[in-house]
Image (cartoon, rainbow, N blue to C red):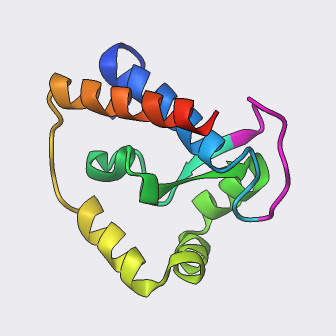
Amino acid sequence: MMYKKGLKGKLDAIFSLYIRTRDKWKCRKCGKQQPYKSRGYHTAHMKGRRKETVRWDETNAFGMCYGCHSFIDQHADEKEKWYVQEFGQEAWDNLVLRSNQSTHFKNWQVQEMIDNYEQKIKALA
């Protein structure tokens, strides 16, 4: 699912800014520091954005440079290996389980997530 407009598009933008700010504009995989709001610094999802149950889940997304993000998206085994090294097998198994559930967020739930991540960004500033 692609959301470019409306609440889900706004949530995508706020969530991405939160993740990159949380990770201090530094690639979680290679450690390379990125300039603030760099276009070469992405929010990498361990389980794809089509999995709406974890699309905006902090345990599913990490700041990564373009190179590392491209690499792990093309090598699912390396993506899993990195995640397990960082957080453990149980965390990976839980993420996989949550990603395989189905849900549809209502507009009020999306708005709550927007408000939550906006507050978290302010707290990091």
Query: Vertical placement of 103 versus 97: above or below?
Result: above
Q: Main secondary structure of the magenta part?
A: loop
Drawn side of residue 24 relative to residue 86, left or right? right
Q: Nearer the viewer, residue 114 or 74?
A: 114
Res 41 quadrant in image: top right
Q: The magenta stretch spans which residues?
A: 30-41
Residue 3 visible in the snapshot: no
Query: Vertical placement of 18 versus 33: above or below?
Result: above
Determine the residue positioned at 42% across, 20% down.
10
Drawn side of residue 66 relative to residue 108, left or right? right
How far across and how far down the image is residue 51, in percent?
31, 50
Drawn side of residue 50 relative to residue 37, left or right? left
- Where the N terminus falls, by quadrant? top left
Determine the residue positioned at 45% across, 28% down.
118
The extreme top residue here reads 6
Drawn side of residue 125 relative to residue 77, left or right? right
Query: Vertical placement of 115 versus 123: above or below?
Result: above
Q: Nearer the viewer, residue 4 or 75?
A: 4
